[in-house]
Image (cartoon, rainbow, N blue to C red):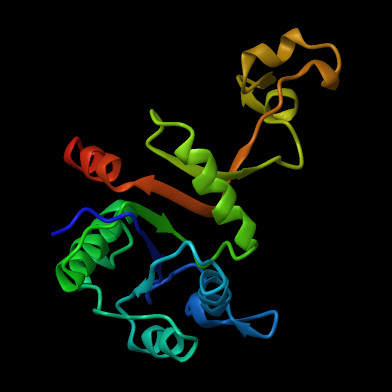
Amino acid sequence: MSIGTTLLAVIPARGGSKGLPGKNIRPFAGLPLIAHSILFAKQCPQITRLIVSTDSPEIASVASHYGADVPFMRPPELARDDTSLWSVLRHALDAVERQDGKTYKHVLLLDPTSPAREPADIEGALDRLSKEPFADGIIGVSRPDFNPIWHCVVEQDGWMTYVFKEGMRYECRQEVPIVYQINGSLYIIWRAAFLRKQASGW
């Protein structure tokens, strides 16, 4: 295999959701939910190849209709409730690299349940990652509606106490450090870092 300088995008979409059955192909803003991530990816010239990893023929049909490649059906053992997402990505990467006869430089995870993205997000993330040689990858984050350091409490023996003890140190919200939440919009990781972390049990 030749060493690639390319980006493999993977949309994982299993068919056995318990919380909201069929969620990946339910209508959202006039389209099946998964279609938003597919159409987004097709607007990003940085993405070399886009695939959908699914165990569902119905999801595969919808994904193909909107222009995604479904090069394999995900094995049942990788479509259980307790299956790790990284196992799904590793399976997808191995299968596609065998099929294509080359390696990819980065792996991009696009969660179909987090469709609020813009093409500039991918460009900006890759640019930032290229300037951080010691980073394994980059993830999408956003500011939450509230700051958990300042607002979150738990009950202990009938009393309310801060989840984060340092929250007691601040007298006004302007003093509290800014926090971010992982929003699921994108995850990009260097292929080498992905394989290294998989080998160490990540």
Q: What residue sits 60% from the left and 21% below the top?
A: 156
Front residue (pair 84, 115): 115
> Which quadrant would residue 88 be assigned to in this image?
bottom left
How far across and down, in percent of the image, does residue 6 sit? 35, 58
How far across and down, in percent of the image, does residue 79 sit? 28, 68
Q: What residue sits 46% from the left and 50% below the top?
A: 187
How far across and down, in percent of the image, does residue 12 sit? 39, 67
Q: What residue sits 30% from the left and 58% below the top?
A: 89
* Tag count: 0
Horizontal placement of 89 versus 141: left or right? left
Q: In the displayed structure, would residue 63 be above or below residue 81? A: below
> Which quadrant would residue 69 be assigned to in this image?
bottom left
Quarter holding the C terminus is: top left
Horizontal placement of 143 versus 43: left or right? right
Q: In the displayed structure, would residue 57 be above or below residue 127? A: below
Q: What residue sits 30% from the left and 56% below the top?
A: 82
Front residue (pair 87, 79): 87
